[in-house]
Image: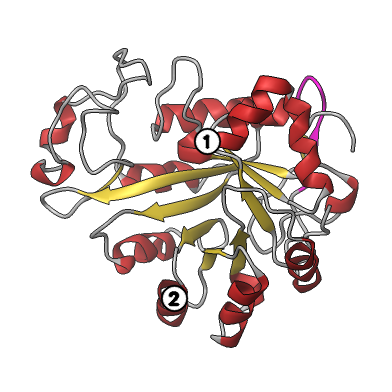
Amino acid sequence: MSTLRLFPFLVVLLSSCSIQYYPGNPDWKSLSAQAAKHQPLVSAHRGGRYLNGYPENALETFQYLHQQLKTQIIEFDVAMTADSHLVVMHDSTLLRTTSCKGPLRAYTLASLNRCRLVLPDSSATDYHIPSYEEILDWAKDQQVLWTVDRKAGVPWNLLAEPIRRMKLQDRMALITYTLEDAVEVHQLYPDLYLSVTIRSLPELNAYLDAGVPTNRMLAFTGTEWTDNKQLLKKLDKLGIPAMLGTLGKLDKEILAKKPSRYKFYVRKGIDIIATDYPLEAARGLGKAM
């Protein structure tokens, strides 16, 4: 696997029973001092979409996952209400993930208080839709790394400025999907880390040519496996962590066979597994490489 030289701090050790971590405050700047000797990190997509009894994008889900894994990466989505408050929500409408229905932008923050999050089978929970500030307030005292997915209409400054105010720049990475967005965010907030989509050498070179610094990048290599050896080798040489999204098709294929299949991608040079099944992925990565 790649060395993760850019991020020489957080070392995650997976065993078949548990995940251990080195004490201290993890940050994106120093992600794993001896990564070549240890296991990669697991990133929980929407905090884990299929955790038993816990809905996606819920503070309680994040807390439960943190209790189970101790240290990990959590990805979550941020959208805007009718009165311009930020809440944690993936969809533009409420029906799939809450007890309410209709467009999120039709609700004020106060009116969302009556909504409760639901499980994938639509079973009700007692959990409310968390605000962005609630997540940041909890995050500041936890050993967790984060990637933040901006939904349509959310201004970058409403995401970035609270991160700065709470001094979370080294633990929160903003997800960008285009080169233009990455350049814009870096120019506005050069101290923030960015998750950028890099699926090929030409895409990587475009980011380098545009001046996006390698020490502020995580490379999301997509949700399809292409075994791009040249790309992974160059990312490793530059010290840019490579993240593979197994969420969706790959997760299902792996879990239909055996969870240890996650190791295949690590052997090929992937540093972070982004998955809808973080506990299963962690177990699958459990034995030494």
69 falls in the magenta region: no
Residue 17 on the magenta segment: yes
Who's the residue at 46% across and 29% down the image?
49
Q: Amino acid at mark 2?
A: Tyr
Among the two numbered marks 2 and 1 on one chain, the one whose residue lies closer to the N terminus: 2
The residue segment tinted magenta is: 11-18
Write the residue at 64% across / 29% down: 253
Identify the image quadrant of residue 187. bottom left
Q: Quadrant of the C terminus?
A: top right
| Lateral position of residue 131 relative to residue 52, left or right | left
271 horizontally vs 109: left or right: right
Residue 280, given in percent of the width and then of the height, sits at 66, 25
Residue 99: image quadrant is top left
Magenta: main secondary structure equals loop
Please name the colour scheme applied to the rendered image.
Answer: secondary structure
Residue 267 screen position, x and y as percent = 84, 46
- SS label for mark 2: loop
SS of the residue at dot 1? loop
Q: CA distance from mark 2 to mark 1?
A: 32 Å
User: Residue at the spot x=46%, y=79% of the render?
Assistant: 183
Residue 257, by quadrant, is top right
What residue is rendered at 82% in x and 27% in y? 15
Question: For mark 1, what is the residue?
Answer: 248
Query: Which three-letter amino acid code belongs to the residue tagged 1?
Result: Gly
Q: Is residue 250 above or below residue 125?
A: below
Question: Dot 2 corresponds to which residue?
Answer: 189
Image location of residue 244, percent across then percent down: 64, 49
Residue 12 in sight: no
Q: How many marks?
A: 2
